[in-house]
Image (cartoon, grey):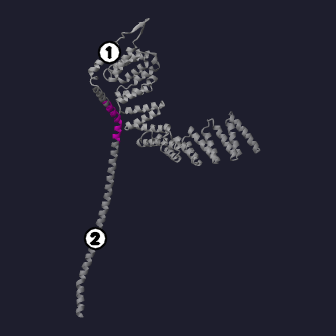
């Protein structure tokens, strides 16, 4: 027994320090673990802070870079737009000369410089030629017309071959003179205008144009247009390329104040298209040609010309304008309303910056209302239009049509009144505003809101006191007081206002008569 107790004591003495050591080890491990956790938390916090700063810095750099990139792209686009037409004209001119050279070479040697020189020498000899069979009867010379017609054909053929090169300026000058001498004054005028536009780079341009002008001013045929001709001479830009001068010439004869010259528009356009087939000026002339056809009732010609622009010149703004006009023809002439809608929507999608986009939106709304009878969609389009284009020339019409649809198709007169009042306020003082407030006053009357109706009629009177209808507004207010509100006193007061303020008017007599009747009826 004693040995057992001794053994337990010994074991206790030996193991107790070990237990203490173990406990210390565990505590130390826990402390180290706590330190690791603290360091990890510090590390995570620092990483989070610096990561946020890094992200902000990266975002800032991205924004700065994106802003600079956008500015650069905007500047590049602006420069491209400024230079595009200039570069295009240079390319067109280069192509023109290449094509002309190719034509010269294609026709073998007939267009070499030596041949051209001989041709021009022949023309000079031809101009001096006198009709050898010209006769005189009773002192009057006859004959010679056939010779002059021959001369004209030779001169025109030279110009077809060489204009505006070679000695074309002299040949054009000769042709004008021959036409003039033959009293073909319209052709002489056309030839002279062509000289003015075509040969500005000729050393003899100034002298020769003034010699021709002298002939023009001396003849009564040109009298009405003499000042216009002088104005053309003063305004021609001599530094433009031949292509642009030719384009301006065609535009001039299109509206020139001599109908005989207007007839040259079509053949000149055809010739220009052959010379500069893929230039922007060709697209512009086709647009003018389409207008030309439409004004003369050739709607299908106009439509097909617009198709030509759309398919041949998609890179130019004229293609978008042609699409817009094609939509108009589809709707107004062919009754192809769905196709017209498609054209308008395509135009908007492909030409978002065009100034014609608002009109396209308005036309869509009109088609939906007037032809397709989709009133809910039309109303939505009109309202979107008024919101998106508050200052457009079509905004008032869009708002009026919105009110009309709500009133007539949806049958919500109170909502219609609200729209009409918005119109009246937006266009206060204008005929549109007056019509809108009148509609609101009448609709208030129809739905039984008589006091509101009176208020609007009185507002109409105050806003348009000088209009001939102004006294009628007062009569209507008096009528409502009497017949709908049974307020005889206010009816008489309103009528009395008419007699006192418009004593010399016809309505004043009517007002006084009604006052007497009401006074008698009320026993006063």
Q: Quadrant of the N terminus?
A: bottom left
Q: Which residue is mark 1?
A: 124
Q: Is residue 293 left or right of residue 127?
A: right
Q: Is residue 479 above or below residue 6?
A: above
> Residue at 70% across / 39% down in the picture?
496
> Residue at 25% across / 86% down in the picture?
12
State yes or no: residue 79 in magenta. yes
Q: Position of residue 329 (x, y in %)?
A: 47, 37
Q: Is residue 374 left or right of residue 39?
A: right
- State the image quarter where residue 270 is shown: top left
Disc ID at residue 523 = none
For residue 163, say whether it is visible. no
> Residue at 63% across / 48% down in the picture?
447
Q: Position of residue 234 (x, y in %)?
A: 40, 23
State yes or no: residue 9 in magenta. no
Q: Is residue 117 above or below residue 484?
A: above
How crowded pointer 2 is (Cα within 10 Å; few <14, some 14-19, many 20+) is rated as: few
Q: Quadrant of the C terminus?
A: top right
- Dot 2 falls on a residue whose secondary structure is helix
Q: Is residue 266 above or below residue 321?
A: above
Q: Is residue 431 left or right of residue 145?
A: right
- Residues under numbered marks 1 and 2 in contact, where contact means CB atoms less than 8 Å apart: no
Q: Earlier in the sequence, mark 1 or mark 2?
A: 2
Disc ID at residue 33 = 2
> Magenta stretch mostly in which secondary structure?
helix
- Dot 1 falls on a residue whose secondary structure is helix
Q: Which residues are magenta?
A: 74-94
């Amino acid at each position: 027994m004693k040995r057992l107790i001794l053994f337990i004591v010994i074991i206790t003495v030996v193991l107790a320090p070990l237990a203490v050591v173990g406990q210390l080890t565990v505590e130390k491990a826990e402390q180290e673990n706590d330190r690791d956790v603290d360091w990890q938390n510090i590390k995570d916090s620092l990483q989070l802070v610096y990561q946020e700063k890094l992200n902000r810095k990266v975002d800032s750099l991205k924004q700065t870079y994106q802003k600079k990139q956008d500015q650069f792209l905007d500047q590049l686009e602006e420069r491209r737009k400024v230079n595009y037409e200039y570069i295009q004209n240079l390319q067109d001119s280069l192509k023109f000369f290449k094509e002309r050279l190719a034509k010269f070479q294609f026709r073998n040697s007939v267009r070499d410089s030596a041949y051209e020189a001989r041709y021009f020498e022949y023309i000079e000899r031809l101009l001096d030629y006198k009709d050898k069979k010209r006769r005189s009867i009773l002192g009057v010379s006859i004959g010679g017309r056939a010779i002059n017609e021959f001369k004209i054909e030779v001169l025109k053929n030279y110009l077809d071959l060489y204009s505006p090169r070679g000695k074309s300026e002299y040949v054009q000058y000769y042709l004008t003179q021959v036409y003039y001498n033959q009293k073909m004054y319209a052709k002489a005028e056309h030839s002279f205008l062509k000289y003015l536009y075509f040969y500005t780079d000729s050393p003899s341009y100034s002298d020769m144009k003034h010699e021709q002008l002298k002939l023009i001013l001396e003849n009564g045929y040109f009298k009405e247009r003499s000042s216009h001709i002088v104005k053309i001479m003063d305004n021609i830009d001599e530094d433009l390329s031949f292509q642009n001068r030719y384009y301006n010439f065609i535009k001039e004869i299109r509206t020139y104040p001599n109908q005989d010259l207007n007839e040259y528009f079509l053949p000149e356009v055809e010739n220009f298209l052959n010379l500069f087939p893929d230039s922007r000026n060709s697209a512009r002339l086709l647009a003018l040609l389409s207008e030309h056809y439409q004004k003369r009732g050739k709607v299908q010609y106009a439509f097909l010309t617009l198709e030509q622009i759309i398919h041949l010149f998609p890179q130019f703004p004229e293609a978008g304008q042609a699409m817009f006009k094609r939509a108009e023809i589809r709707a107004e002439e062919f009754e192809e309303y769905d196709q017209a809608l498609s054209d308008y929507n395509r135009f908007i999608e492909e030409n978002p910056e065009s100034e014609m986009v608002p009109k396209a939106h308005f036309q869509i709304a009109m088609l939906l209302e007037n032809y397709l009878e989709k009133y809910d969609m039309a109303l939505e389009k009109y309202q979107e239009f008024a919101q998106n284009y508050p200052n457009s020339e079509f905004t008032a019409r869009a708002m009026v049509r919105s009110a009309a649809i709500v009133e007539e198709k949806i049958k919500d007169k109170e909502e219609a009144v609200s729209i009409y009042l918005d119109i009246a306020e937006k266009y206060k003082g204008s005929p549109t505003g007056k019509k809108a407030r009148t509609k609101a006053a009448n609709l208030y009357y129809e739905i039984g809101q008589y006091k509101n109706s009176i208020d609007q009629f009185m507002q109409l009177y105050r806003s348009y006191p000088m209009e001939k209808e102004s006294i009628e507004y007062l009569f209507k207010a008096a009528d409502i007081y009497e017949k709908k509100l049974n307020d005889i006193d206010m009816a008489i007061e309103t009528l009395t206002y008419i007699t006192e303020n418009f004593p010399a008017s016809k309505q004043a007599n009517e007002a006084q008569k009604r006052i007497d009747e009401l006074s008698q009826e009320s026993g006063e």
